[in-house]
Amino acid sequence: MLAIIGGSGLTRLSTLAVAHREVVRTPYGDPSSTLLFGQIAGVDAVFLARHGHGHTIPPHRVNYRANAWALKEKGATGILAVASVGGIRDCVPGDLVLPDQLIDYTFGREATFYDGSEGKVVHVDFTQPYSPELRAKCLVAASAAGLTLREGGVYGAVNGPRLETAAEVDRMAGDGATLVGMTGMPEAVLARELDLPYAAICVVVNHAAGRGDSTRAISMAGITQVLEAGMDRVRTLLDHIAPAW
């Protein structure tokens, strides 16, 4: 069963025919939202709103461990995450991007299930942070849906909730980041620790600080407009991905 984690702009999944809702308790606290179980294009799926159904949880306070654990516990066999991001290079607002690498700039987050409480040290390979198999399915689905999904990119995960300074974005560009977002980590590594294939579909909603039309400031109104149109295409894409899972 494919799990979909919706971010900003995707707190509800209109294409999911909901069969039932379930409140899940975990050893790590409560997930961000009730899990919605149902079907997309006739295929079983489960949806979780990363920021809560009312979009009330900021990125640095999301209980990423509870979210991942709840999805695994309830039968998810893979996670497709949807996120809004800023574009640093090789993309423009409105693009859908399928990153293949990431850089973690976050801090202070509960970033592992292996925190030493079980009396052992566990190291998890993270060379390729996103599942090649799930990414391949996304690309095939995009082609079938007639959508452009940019293949490849480096997601720079920052803490938020504030947006970045132009100098910070310059630093990230120097590191090789092409996208900047606030929720990519530790979500990706927690999925890896649970042996859940994970991929991210990123909606570029603005030029990152200091770039393009964000040279002097980032327009929040502009982000909202791009986000709404982008999420409509994401829903279409999900309708094609789910049957392939």
Image: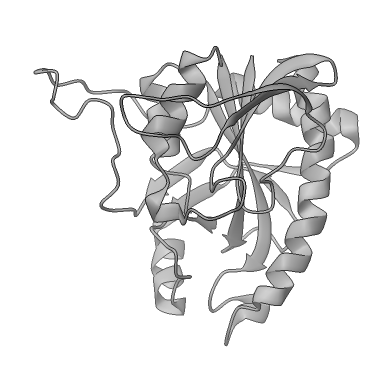
What kind of colouring is applied to the model shown? Answer: one colour
Closer to the camera in the image, 115 or 200: 115
Which of the image's four quarters has the C terminus? Answer: top right
Tell me if 144 is positioned left or right of 31 in this view. right
> Is 37 placed above or below 168 here?
above
Residue 232, horizontal then vertical, whole percent:
83, 47
Which residue is at 72% across, 66% downward? 224
Q: Residue furthest left?
A: 119
Tell me if 57 is positioned left or right of 227 in this view. left
Which residue is at 30% across, 47% downward? 109
Tell me if 43 is positioned left or right of 120 in this view. right
> Is 3 placed above or below 177 here?
above
Residue 118, horizontal then vertical, whole percent:
14, 18
Closer to the camera in the image, 62 or 122: 62
Which of the image's four quarters has the N terminus? Answer: top right
Closer to the camera in the image, 199 or 19: 19
Residue 52, horizontal then vertical, whole percent:
55, 46
The part of the image, by quadrant, that contains residue 161 is bottom left
Which residue is at 67% across, 57% downward? 204
Answer whether residue 169 is visible to the viewer in this image: yes
Answer whether residue 94 is visible to the viewer in this image: no
Which residue is at 58% across, 84% downward? 217
Residue 17, horizontal then vertical, whole percent:
81, 25
